[in-house]
Image: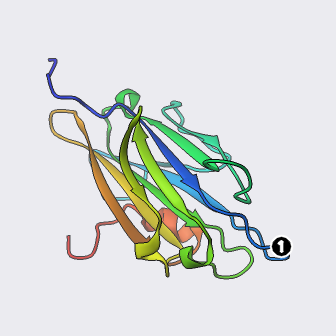
Amino acid sequence: MSTPNKDIEKVEIRLKWDPSSQGEPPNDLDIIAATYSAEEPYGAPEYLVHFDSRAPDGTITLNRDSRTGQGLGYDEVMTLELDRLSDSYARVVVGVAIQQRDGRKTFDAVENTAVQIREGYNSLSEDDFSTVGAATAAVVAEFVRDVSGVWRFHDTVRGFEGDADSFAATMGSRPPGA
């Protein structure tokens, strides 16, 4: 059955930040996407997409990866083709984690951070992480498939504490009080 409602089909998550100061360990931020099944939308992720990986079906890909934040424009870009994602998935949660290899680093310690979520030329969301400055990772978007099969975008920025591995394991959990 077709519907006249516009669905979110293909989105791009874009992340940028400034390199660390000379002599300091590099600022390395990573976009992470986690897919959740329709049977357990708040359970463990079915799979993760991050640096050096992609979705098994090619629907979520990291197009650009940076380990330093050097360069012009956005340093990391991930594409989610929600319109091609299997009906067995009901949620996709996207986050950003700061690598903690060289000691604890928070968003406050990384200059000029920004994340932008776009569908085509339309900006769905933009944030600079200032509301989660003391965090080491943050959820930046949630896409939920409703009962009619239409994807809905939930604009959210929630901070987390910990390294990239612990964040990836808990980023799709229910927010406190939900």
- The residue at the point 74 percent across, 70 percent down is 20
Quarter that holds the N terminus: top left
User: Along the horizontal axis of the image, is 155 left or right of 16?
Assistant: left
Q: Nearer the viewer, residue 147 or 77?
A: 77
Q: Position of residue 56 (x, y in %)?
A: 54, 35
Which residue type carries mark 1? Answer: Gln
Q: Residue at x 57, y 44 (%)?
A: 77
Classify the position of the C terminus by image quarter: bottom left
User: Farthest right residue?
Assistant: 23
Question: Does residue 52 appear to the left or right of 163 in the view shown?
Answer: right
Q: Residue at x 80, y 76 (%)?
A: 24
Residue 158, located in which quarter of the rendered image? Answer: bottom left
Residue lying at the far top of the rendered structure:
1
The residue that label 1 is drawn on is 22
The residue tagged with tag 1: helix, strand or loop?
A: loop
Quadrant in the rendering for residue 21: bottom right
Question: Is residue 149 at least partly visible in the picture?
Answer: yes
Specify the color scheme. Answer: rainbow
Report whether residue 46 is seen. Answer: no
Q: Is residue 91 left or right of residue 27?
A: left
Few, some or many residues within 10 Å of mark 1 (<14, 14–19, 20+): few
Q: Is residue 32 above or below residue 98?
A: above
Q: Is residue 144 above or below residue 108?
A: above
x and y percentages locating residue 130 in the rendered image: 45, 73
Horizontal and vertical percent position of residue 139: 42, 62
Q: Is residue 19 above or below residue 63?
A: below
Place of residue 39 in the rendered image (x, y in percent of width and height, measured from the top left): 26, 47
Count of labels in the image: 1
